[in-house]
Image (cartoon, rainbow, N blue to C red):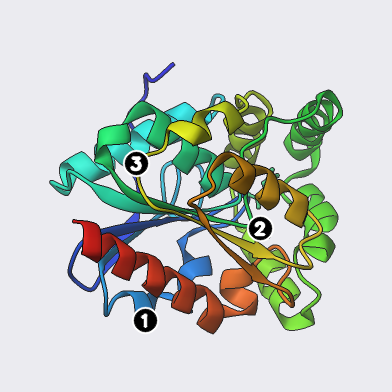
Amino acid sequence: MVNHLVRLFYEEHGSGLPLVLIHGFPFNHTIWSEVIPELAKQARVIVPDLRGFGRSEAPPGVYTMRQMAADIAELLDALKIQKTTLVGHSMGGYVSLAFAQAYPDQMLALGMVASHAAADTPEKRADRYATAAEVLLQGPEVVARSMVPKLTSDRALQENIHRMILGTQPVGLIGALKGMAERIDSLPLLAAMKFPVMIIAGGSDQLVPLERAREMVARMPKAQMVVIPEAGHMPMLETPTKVAGALVDLCHEVKKIF
Ligand code: MLT
């Protein structure tokens, strides 16, 4: 249910058609910092922290994808933005799909980075609730310990990401874990998308295998798929030049249409 307004932190860079970059779990807007300079030459880039993350408010409760999409809609409303390109990393992709479903007329284009459209398996759902219970007792270190080695093989990046996760509020981690566990299967929605879609996948992603990206493209034959063989789950940090280049292409496609 959409019922709780929160104060979201966001940054804005550049000018042009709007482009919103939504971070994944359990990160914040800073994961986009390497790609922003190139993108800001093409677009009005908005980078929010989702509820519970970074510098945004962290209310208690379950952060459904629909709720987080409604938060983004509120932010766009406040910024007087009627239509935008949404690019979501991993959980940010789940939020972007929920946004595209709830507000299809506000979409210019969709970018999914290391993300996918399926719901959790029953095992994954149970694992999320177990992790949420552990976070309550032990804090964010639980999430950092289990996730960081799977995110990237780059040691320096691992250290930075570990620090980022330790700075995240437990209530935010718990809210998002439960929200992800409850999300719907968005695969059946893909065929109805009437705007450009780009799927960026890391060829070495241990969390979202390439198969998941292919599963989406199978439903959207016109979608553009960009595979970055050397990237893991954090392509915007591991291979920022390639990610920025792909998203600049998406911006050009949007400019041709709108
Ligand atoms: C993310 O990076 O947002 C998460 O890996 C998504 C997930 O746990 O499903």
State the image quarter where residue 42 is shown: bottom left
Q: Position of residue 258 (x, y in %)?
A: 18, 56
Q: Residues within 10 Å of mark 2 (few under 14, many from 20)?
A: many
Q: Residues within 10 Å of mark 3 (few under 14, many from 20)?
A: many
Q: In the picture provided, is 77 more to the left or to the right than 98?
A: left
Circle on res. 72: 3
Q: Position of residue 145 (x, y in %)?
A: 83, 57
Q: Gap between marks 3 and 1, in whole Å?
A: 23 Å
Residue type (three-letter) at the residue carrying disc 2: Ile
Q: Nearer the viewer, mark 2 or mark 1?
A: 1
Q: Residues within 10 Å of mark 1 (few under 14, many from 20)?
A: some
Q: Nearer the viewer, residue 62 or 35?
A: 35
Q: Which residue is located at x 48 percent, y 51 percent?
A: 222
Residue type (three-letter) at the residue carrying disc 3: Ile
Q: Which residue is located at x 62 percent, y 50 percent?
A: 115
The residue wearing badge 2 is 165
Residue that protrudes farthest toward the front in the picture: 221
Q: In the picture provided, is 248 more to the left or to the right than 153?
A: left
